[in-house]
Image: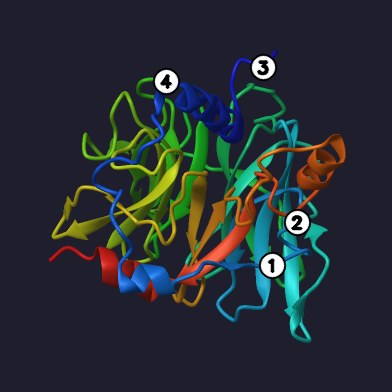
């Protein structure tokens, strides 16, 4: 048995715990009627039946021209994660292909840099030929012929614990999640100074608490806001929710739930900002079609093989909506 959990496995374990803890009623702060904006907004599934399928998809990154999608597929329950690419041609998404460096190890949570030329991802692949049984952050550059060879991110980002997600600002600073502090997953920052990643900074108690598991932290290109995927953060709709915090003159605001137009009782996670800055891309395990109250065996088989079977699908909503409805006054 491995000495570490993958990010998805750890999140799933916490989600299972949450089933025993959370009561059916919503937290008072989120059990309100939808506003007109919320009622009108419906997240758009990306590539229904081609990209978003009955399999488990997550971590969508949309290029600035909207024609390339980098994402992850997992083989439940978390035996293998692969990184994939699909292209939008002639009005539809092409059949995805696996990235050339992926497929042997558990490669998870790809995140493109703001210029689209660097990809950060977490992986349990060996470091210098040694299988350390941990997830570390790796970097790979886009070349004229595709993607290069992944490199271990040196400096303050990686240590002897699990690092399961990382995103990069335009200045090279990396925001990431790690189990290094308490064994839970917290949010850290490593600044890039003269080409070297500095010692990681704990972002503090507004973000990190023993009862909160934050698996994703996506920084805006200019570091003006941070998108977060967390279990246990309040207010919540019941599972992992998406939140946002704003950087106001160097001080971060308390993370705010993105609301019922985006978050549901199911798991919402893995936020990304599209390359053109127009879309919030995220993953949801929502059941957009209600499950039958009673089931036969054939009903169950049909449900489990369907698009809305409780595994991850990729969605997008206008980022303008998110920023407009969450901006501090």
Q: Kindly tell me whether residue 161 is visible in this rendering.
A: no
- What residue do we see at 45% from left, 41% from top? 240
- Seen from the viewer's position, the closer of residues 256 and 83 is 256
Q: Label 2 vs label 1: CA separation?
A: 29 Å
Horizontal and vertical percent position of residue 92: 76, 79
Label 4 belongs to which residue?
183
Mark sitting earlier along the chain (2/3): 3
Residue lying at the far right in this picture: please name it: 298
Mark sitting earlier along the chain (4/2): 2
Mark sitting earlier along the chain (3/4): 3
Label 3 belongs to which residue?
2
Mark sitting earlier along the chain (3/1): 3
Are there few (<14), some (14-19), or many (20+) residues within 10 Å of tag 4? Answer: few
What secondary structure is marked by label 1?
A: strand
Are there few (<14), some (14-19), or many (20+) residues within 10 Å of tag 2? Answer: many
Horizontal and vertical percent position of residue 132: 63, 22
Using the image, tell me which numbered label, if any, was put on residue 22.
Answer: none
């Amino acid at each position: 048995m491995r000495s570490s959990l993958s990010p998805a496995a750890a999140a799933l374990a916490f989600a299972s715990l949450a089933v025993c803890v959370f009561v059916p009623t919503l937290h008072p702060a989120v059990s309100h009627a939808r506003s007109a904006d919320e009622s009108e907004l419906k997240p758009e599934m990306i590539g229904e039946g081609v990209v978003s399928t009955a399999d488990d998809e997550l971590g969508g990154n949309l290029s600035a021209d909207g024609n390339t999608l980098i994402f992850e597929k997992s083989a439940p329950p978390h035996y293998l994660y692969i990184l994939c690419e699909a292209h939008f041609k002639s009005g539809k998404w092409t059949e995805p292909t696996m990235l050339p460096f992926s497929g042997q190890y558990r490669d998870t949570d790809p995140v493109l840099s703001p210029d689209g030329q660097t990809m950060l991802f977490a992986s349990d692949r060996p470091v210098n030929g040694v299988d350390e049984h941990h997830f570390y952050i790796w970097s790979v550059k886009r070349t004229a012929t595709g993607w290069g060879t992944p490199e271990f991110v040196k400096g303050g980002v990686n240590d002897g614990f699990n690092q399961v997600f990382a995103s990069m600002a335009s200045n090279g600073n990396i925001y990431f999640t790690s189990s290094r502090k308490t064994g839970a997953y917290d949010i850290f920052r490593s600044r890039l100074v003269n080409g070297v990643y500095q010692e990681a900074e704990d972002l503090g108690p507004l973000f990190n608490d023993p009862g909160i598991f934050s698996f994703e932290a996506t920084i805006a290109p200019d570091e003006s806001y941070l998108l977060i995927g967390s279990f246990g953060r309040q207010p919540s709709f019941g599972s992992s929710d998406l939140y946002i915090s704003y950087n106001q003159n160097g001080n971060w605001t308390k993370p705010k739930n993105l609301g019922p137009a985006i978050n549901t009782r199911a798991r919402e996670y893995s936020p990304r900002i599209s390359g053109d800055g127009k879309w919030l891309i995220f993953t949801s395990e929502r059941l957009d079609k209600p499950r039958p109250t009673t089931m036969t065996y054939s009903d169950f088989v049909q449900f489990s093989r369907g698009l809305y079977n409780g595994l991850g699908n990729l969605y997008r909503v206008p980022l303008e909506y998110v920023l407009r409805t969450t901006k501090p006054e």
